[in-house]
Amino acid sequence: MEPHINNVQGADIIEADDEKLWFCVYTHPKQEGVAARGLKKIGGFEVFNPQLRIRKATRRGPVWFVESAFPGYIFVRFNLDLHLDNVRYATAVSKVVQFKSGYPVVPDVQVQELQALFGPDDIAILASDVSVGDSVRIVGGAFHDLVAVVQQVKPATERVQVLLEFLGRLTLVETDLDKVVKEERGHVAVQLLNLGGFGRRGETRAAF
């Protein structure tokens, strides 16, 4: 049985414009972009697909990736009574998020706040700068993919000192800034320092 699609006329869109609200739409896995482009194309719907530009560690060095900020979800503004079928049967759309009480509306102010954060292109760049106490992942070399804690940043030489556990010992490593990728602030520091503490026996130093 073919899904029923409402025929949307231009006059209907203008007349119902004041009734357009933001709804959360669930997409097929990793298809947020496909769904967003399809909805804009078939009905001219206003779509907000927030994405993050993230620098990640790979074998070939740090690489920038663009990922969905809310994997599997996008926000679409439409008139529920007129255009529900147009949205839920669109390419790469799984469903419009629904609870027992109905389809929850996302307040305009919340969407506007998010849009302000992500900018006109709907993409926010996660800062790649590192600070003392940050948790970082090392890229390349003998310590590839190990997690460490930043101890000192040297902007003039673009070098950084990090503390990591290697072969059961705390090791102070100095490397290039572009060979570390920030993970999250502060959470790993306590775990590493609890292994024996910086400056105690078992600490070694290395550079690469």
Image (cartoon, helix red, strand yellow):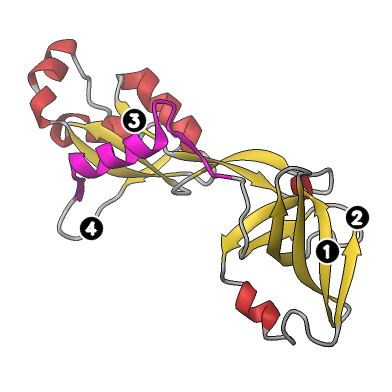
Give the amino acid type for the residue marked by disc 1 in the picture.
Answer: Val
Local secondary structure at mark 1: strand
Q: First in sequence, mark 1 or 3: give its number.
A: 3
Q: Are marks 1 and 2 in contact (CB under 8 Å)?
A: yes
Query: Residue placed farthest to the front in the image?
Result: 156
Which quadrant is the N terminus positioned in? top left
Instruction: Tell me how far mark 1 sits from mark 3, CA to CA.
Output: 46 Å
Q: First in sequence, mark 1 or 2: give its number.
A: 1
Q: Is residue 144 visible?
A: yes
Instruction: Tell me how far mark 3 sits from mark 2, CA to CA.
Output: 47 Å
Instruction: Tell me how far mark 4 sits from mark 1, CA to CA.
Output: 52 Å
Q: Nearer the viewer, mark 1 or mark 3?
A: 1
Q: Nearer the viewer, mark 3 or mark 2?
A: 2
| Residue 41: % across, % down | 39, 19
Q: Residues within 10 Å of mark 1 (few under 14, many from 20)?
A: many
Q: Is residue 179 above or below residue 196?
A: above
Give the amino acid type for the residue marked by disc 2 in the picture.
Answer: Phe
**For residue 99, which numbered disc appears in the image?**
4
Q: Nearer the viewer, residue 204 or 143?
A: 204
Q: Nearer the viewer, mark 3 or mark 4?
A: 3
Q: First in sequence, mark 3 or 2: give its number.
A: 3
Q: Which residue is mark 3?
A: 47
Local secondary structure at mark 2: loop
Local secondary structure at mark 4: loop
Q: Which residue is mark 2?
A: 208
